[in-house]
Image (spheres, rainbow, N blue to C red):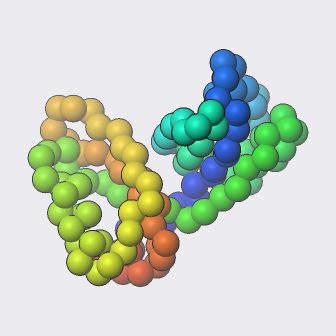
Amino acid sequence: MPKTTQLTLTLESKPGVLAKVCQALAGAGVNIVAICAAEAAGQGKIRMVVSDPARAKDALKAAKLRCGEEQALMLTLEDRPGALARVAEKLAGAKINIKCAYATTGGTGGSATVVLTVPNVDKAAALLGG
């Protein structure tokens, strides 16, 4: 069960903000592996997994973008109905809350990559077999 570092940014929700984040990372040669960007009450919350978190943090700081980090799980699941439901049920049974989830799939079977943010990554990873 691979644990990963998820970067988090809380920024103003306005045109160009996501572009600035992505340009800063691209300029540093950092690839975005997974991203979730949502808005609530005029604030944008960006969560992402990148190829090089340390270099990404430096690039974001240089672009005057403050970011934090937290541990997350990056799971590879079968791309079929019920795969994520089984993981969520297992975590719920152990009283582990899922604070955030985002995923990417090919939509054709195969596998899906899912990022989960939970309060206790080590406990969740052990429960899920990692």
Q: Position of residue 82 (x, y in %)?
A: 13, 53
Q: How far from the left and from the top, in percent, is residue 41? A: 58, 37
Residue 2 visible in the displayed image:
no
Residue farthest to the left, as pictured: 81
Residue 121 drawn at (x, y percent): 47, 73
Residue at 60% across, 63% down: 70
- Eyeballing the image, is 46 above or below 78? above
Taking 75 as reference, is 8 left or right? right
Residue at position x 64%, y 29% in the image: 13
The residue at the point 14 percent across, 45 percent down is 80
Quadrant of the drawing holding the N terminus = bottom left
Residue sitting farthest toward the top:
15
Q: Is residue 116 above or below residue 110?
A: below
How many numbered circles are shown? Answer: 0
User: Where does the C terminus fall, quadrant-wise?
Assistant: bottom left
Residue 120 visible? The answer is yes
Horizontal and vertical percent position of residue 19: 67, 23
Q: Is 129 displayed left or right of 82 in the figure?
A: right
The residue shown at (64%, 37%) is: 43
